[in-house]
Each structure stands twice: as C-alpha cells, then as structure tokens.
Image (cartoon, rainbow, N blue to C red):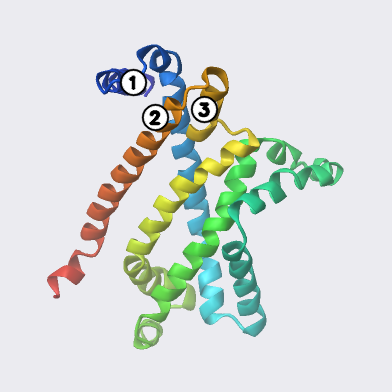
Amino acid sequence: MGEFFGIIGTGFINLMGLLGFNAELMGRYGPRFLDGVVVTLELVAISMICGGILAIPLAIARVEGNKFVSRLAFGYSYFFRGTPLLAQTFLVYYGAGQFRVELESLGLWWLFRDAFFCAVLTFTLNTAAYQAEILRGGIESLPVGQMEGAKSLGLSGVLAYRKVILPQAIGIGLRPLGNELVLMIKASSIASIITVYDLMGVTRLAFSRSYDMEVYLWAAVLYLVMVEIVRRVWNVLERRLNRHLMLSR
C-alpha cells in the first residue's frame, strides 16, 4: 500500500510540475498532500458507513415507529439537517472538554480528546440524518403490498425489512446517497479547523509556512479528482445494482 501511494505521489508531483506549478514547493509538500488525501478518504468512508448503519433504525422509526419514537427520530433528523456542520463539530470537539471528568470515569475520554475521532463522530451523526431521510423516502415510495406480501410468506418484520424492503429502498436511494457522499467529501474540509490534518488541514499548514496561494489550487484539484472518481464509480455501482430496473423500461 505504501509503494502504491508512493507511485501515485510521484506521478502527482510530476504532473503538477508539467502544468507549471512550483516544483520546489511541490517537492516539499506533495507527499504531505497525499497523506492528507488518505486521511480525508478515511474520515469520509468511516463516517458514511457508520452513518448508514445508524440511518437504518432512524428511517424505520420514522415509518413504522409509534408517534413518540417517530417524533424523536424526526427531531434528531431536524436538528442535524438544520444546523451547520461546523457548529456541530465545535459542540462535540470543544463541548466534550466540559465533561472531561465524567468522560474519564466512563472510559470515553480517549475518544473525545482525539480530533480525528471527534470529526468522525460528528460527521457520522450528521450524515446519518441525511441518509435516514433518503431511506425513508425510498421505503415510502414502495407499494404497501411489499410488506404485506413478505408477512404472508411468514417473514418477521425484521426479516421483511432485511430481505425485501431495505434492498429496494437502498436501490431507489442510490443516486441521492451518491450525492450525499460527494457532499461529505467536500464538507470534510471542516475537520481541518479542529486540527485534523486531512487534505485541507495540510493545505492550511503548507500555506502558513510558504504563504503561497498555489497550495489552495492544489487542494481544489485534488478535491475535484476525488469527487470525479467517486461520481464515476458510483454511476457504475448504480447501473449494476439497478440493472433490473433499466431492463424493465
């Protein structure tokens, strides 16, 4: 893996040199930028996966839960979709310090004292709210007979969702889920404010030492490359998983 990123890093540095970028600056900070890309991808991947797991019970609670549970799920979604991600990040990162004694007694301070894990937690809670709404829309778009048919076959509610409802709802929501992934990649730059050395964190560090605005152009190019790769991969995934829908048209 290290050799792979080394080759990619060398190619990136050579490409930037050919495009007229500052070769000396690129040689000094290019490897750090590649490290920042890796941190960004790790942050987004972990947050999206954990957020997706949390989104499933939230979406089901919105659709199937009693009024109290449904309102709790709605309140969660309303808060995290209606407030800035930056404010949420500050609440977790700086707010946790106000409860250090309690967190240490629970054995959780190791988690909240690490900026990366605070960013992962915040991004997970945030994207879970958006993914839950996407899944809820997918579930509600399915015919009512889907659940009734599953139950008539003897499937329990859990199995019905696992085998019948959720696969279809996820298929319907693949495109908005892809959009959410792209938005998370761009929003991940917020983590740099709490000293996470993701791509934007490395960019800010490089600028503070070189005062060369060119480093922000590098960051923009790298974000664009990441988004374009994700977009193309997601399009292939969507076509594969929804090929039965395309054949039925």
Q: Position of residue 17 (x, y in %)?
A: 29, 18
- Up-down: is 120 above or below 51? above
Tell me the CA gap for discs 2 and 1: 9 Å
| Neighbourhood count class around disc 3 (C-alpha, 10 Å): few under 14, some 14–19, many 20 upward | many
The quarter of the picture where residue 221 lies is: top left
Is residue 115 in view? yes
Disc 2 marks a residue whose amino acid type is Trp
Q: Which residue: 55% across, 30% down?
A: 197
Q: For the residue labelled by badge 1, is the local secondary structure a helix, a strand or a loop?
A: loop
Residue ID for mark 3: 202
Residue ID for mark 1: 21
Mark 2 in CB contact with mark 1 (< 8 angstroms): yes
Disc 3 marks a residue whose amino acid type is Val
Tell me the CA gap for discs 2 and 3: 11 Å
Q: Which residue: 35% across, 88% down?
A: 145
Of label 2 and label 1, which has the lower sequence position?
1
Of label 2 and label 3, which has the lower sequence position?
3
The quarter of the picture where residue 214 lies is: top left
Is residue 54 in view? no
- Which mark is nearer the camera, 1 or 3? 1
Mark on residue 218?
2
